[in-house]
Image: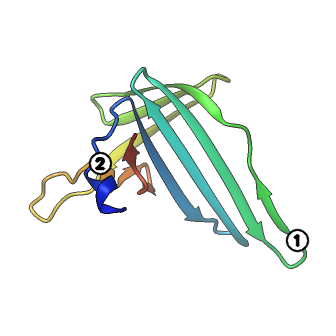
Amino acid sequence: MHGAERHRRPRRDRARAARSRRERRGHGYFTEHLQFNADGTFVRNAVASGTGPVVDWASVPPADRGTYEVGADGLLRLAFADGKLRAETIGVFLADDGTPKSPTEGIVLDSDGYFDISEN
């Protein structure tokens, strides 16, 4: 992040988060991007790719959309337009003194870390 960007005032109408993890089988990768909008809607994009002994592959499905809410119980509830539901526990990282760090430093949804978080 460049100094000019660091001090730029972020827009508050949406936030983005991304996770990336290596698949356990073969040599594959999965990346998920979530964009949360202030009006309670979200957009999910994902890509999976990998290499094998014969072929390299990639899969980029169409974006998923829906609505979200964050409950007092610490659950993020995603309701997809196709009727699918997803609920994940939200966790934030703690500073050495036990206070929560800024969510832009990373959050955990269930057991997956999301680290490329921005408000813009």
Q: Which residue is mark 1?
A: 55
Q: Residue 85, position in %: x, y? A: 56, 29
In the rendered image, which quarter contains the C terminus? top left
Residue at x-position 72% and y-position 38%:
62
Q: Is residue 108 above or below residue 74?
A: below
Q: Which residue is mark 2?
A: 103
Colour scheme shown: rainbow
Query: As drawn, which residue projects farthest toward the bottom?
Result: 53
Towards the viewer: 6 or 118 = 6
Query: As drawn, which residue projects farthest toward the left?
Result: 97
Check residue 97 in the rendering and tell me which mark sits there, or answer none.
Answer: none
Q: Amino acid at mark 1?
A: Val
Q: Is residue 80 above or below residue 87?
A: above
Q: Amino acid at mark 2?
A: Pro
Residue 48 is left or right of residue 68, and the answer is: right
Residues at marks 2 and 1, CA–CA distance in whole angstroms: 39 Å
What is the count of numbered marks?
Answer: 2
Q: Residue 117, position in %: x, y? A: 40, 50
Label 2 Cα crowd, 10 Å radius (few <14 / some 14-19 / many 20+):
some
Residue at x-position 49% and y-position 51%:
18
Q: Of marks 2 and 1, which one's residue comes earlier in the chain?
A: 1
Residue at x-position 45% and y-position 33%:
36
> Circle 1 sits in a helix, a strand or a loop, which is it?
loop
